[in-house]
Amino acid sequence: MMLDITLMEIKRLKKTLITGLLAPAFYSLLIMVFYTAFAGAMTELGGILDNASLQNLLKAFSMDTNTFSYILNYYVAYNGVYMLIMGIVFASILSVHLFSKELKDGTYEFIYSNPIRRLKIFVSKAAVIVIYLLVLNIMVFFVGLISIEALKTKSPIFPWLSDENIEMVVNKVDKNPEGLKEAFILDETIFYDVMYSGLNSQFSEISSVSSIDEAVVTDLLTVFLLDPDNIFDELLSDPKYMALFNLENEEIFKTIIENQKDNYFNMKNHFSSDMTVAVSMFKSSPEVFLKQLKTSDQINNFGEVFNINSKELDNLYIYYSFTNYLKLSITVFWVMLSIAFFIMMITIIIPKGRATTGVVTGIAMLIYIINMIGNITEKAKVVKYFSPLSYVNMDVMAIKYHTEQWSIVVMILIIAISVVVSAIAFEKSDLIA
């Protein structure tokens, strides 16, 4: 009987379901169709983005000139949140049709006149929402995947620096240190990039475990971006930087900085000629070196120089991570489900079918606005945690991409509480409008 009710509801709401499935899928496809034009425009802008000042600005945000045109970044930026909103809005409309509109229209008598518990009726109706979201996410997943696979050659490739890949390339470089001269341009640019990467990691780690003002770290990194060789003079010019080294004695601080300054310029002067220095810097920041290779010819030359076979090279340089795409899609489904069940609960709690499409859509948009406010400024960051939309990790380029455990727990709690409260409220509801 429960299955019969579910199938009957699906048949009754087939127009709403079909619209709710096709609209997001079509939007996803349409967005990906424009990727070719977008990638072409980014290529034309390459000369402007290669400007030193803009390069420094991008670097400050851990980006490069290709960040915007990586195909999975594009998919998330133009498809991620909007797909979530569309799915949630349609699921909300579905909730109204399942639990509220039929009471208001007086079409509930047929179901409720049958000798079946209301709890089973509730489960049958809730199953329609789950089925809708499941089918929607599967459709969007495959539309996105097929689009990405078809268009990925228009995307820049990037090094996938998993632990295994790092170990592999470091071993290859250890066996042929002189190969660095053949595979990379060992100039000041790559030297400065490696130093910046090291400073950024070091100072970020220090500021995360201490009470040091983040503005101090930002100021120092900005100085390095503008004039790298002046970084040590800047450190010595202001006692506030002593906190970065956990020092209070100014003489000791001065001695340490002077020693580091000598080491810095010694490394800089021998970087391109002494492969011991170059190998050491490669090991400290392999991503900086590997990101320098952007064309197939450069990557193939790198493979030949270090005797890296085609399979290893294909695992090292990729267009996108399928694993990250899959994890993102799964998280999106659970976020949609948690918000949809929350709105379903609101729909059932509002008495006698008074919940309208406008009301539940407004709730869905409010959740989106809360998330948007939380992203605008650091001071309002805490606000976005009240919106499950913020639980989706949009950093799909991350090697160790994951969803925070606490957000998974929160989503499970939202789903569990919403289902229990909805079931109880539905069981006790007064059906006489």
Image (spheres, helix red, strand yellow):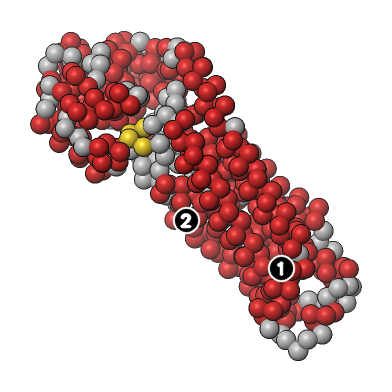
Q: Which residue, given by chain and number where applicable, does mark 1 sit on?
A: 10
Considering the image in quadrants, where does the N terminus appear? bottom right
Left or right: residue 364 versus residue 208 is right
Q: Which callout, 1 or 2, points at the residue further toward the start of the chain? A: 1
Kind of residue at badge 1: Ile
Left or right: residue 180 versus residue 17 is left
Q: Which residue, given by chain and number where applicable, does mark 2 sit on?
A: 406
Decide if residue 355 is in sight here.
yes
- Report the residue at 55% width, 21% height from top: 41
- Neighbor class of circle 1 (other Cα within 10 Å; few <14, some 14-19, many 20+) is many
Say which quarter of the image contains residue 427: bottom right
Kind of residue at badge 2: Trp
Q: Is residue 216 above or below residue 120?
A: above
- Residue furthest to the bottom in view is 115
Considering the image in quadrants, where does the C terminus appear? bottom right
Marks 1 and 2 sit apart, C-alpha to C-alpha, by 34 Å
Q: What is the secondary structure assignment of the residue under circle 2?
A: helix
Left or right: residue 207 versus residue 133 is left
- Report the residue at 51% width, 45% height from top: 146
Q: Is residue 163 above or below residue 255?
A: below
Decide if residue 252 is in sight here.
no
Say which quarter of the image contains residue 372: top right
As rendered, which of 198 and 52 lies closer to the eye? 52
**Residue 211: image location, x then y, percent:** 39, 35
Q: Is residue 106 above or below residue 139?
A: below
**Residue 62: image location, x then y, percent:** 41, 28
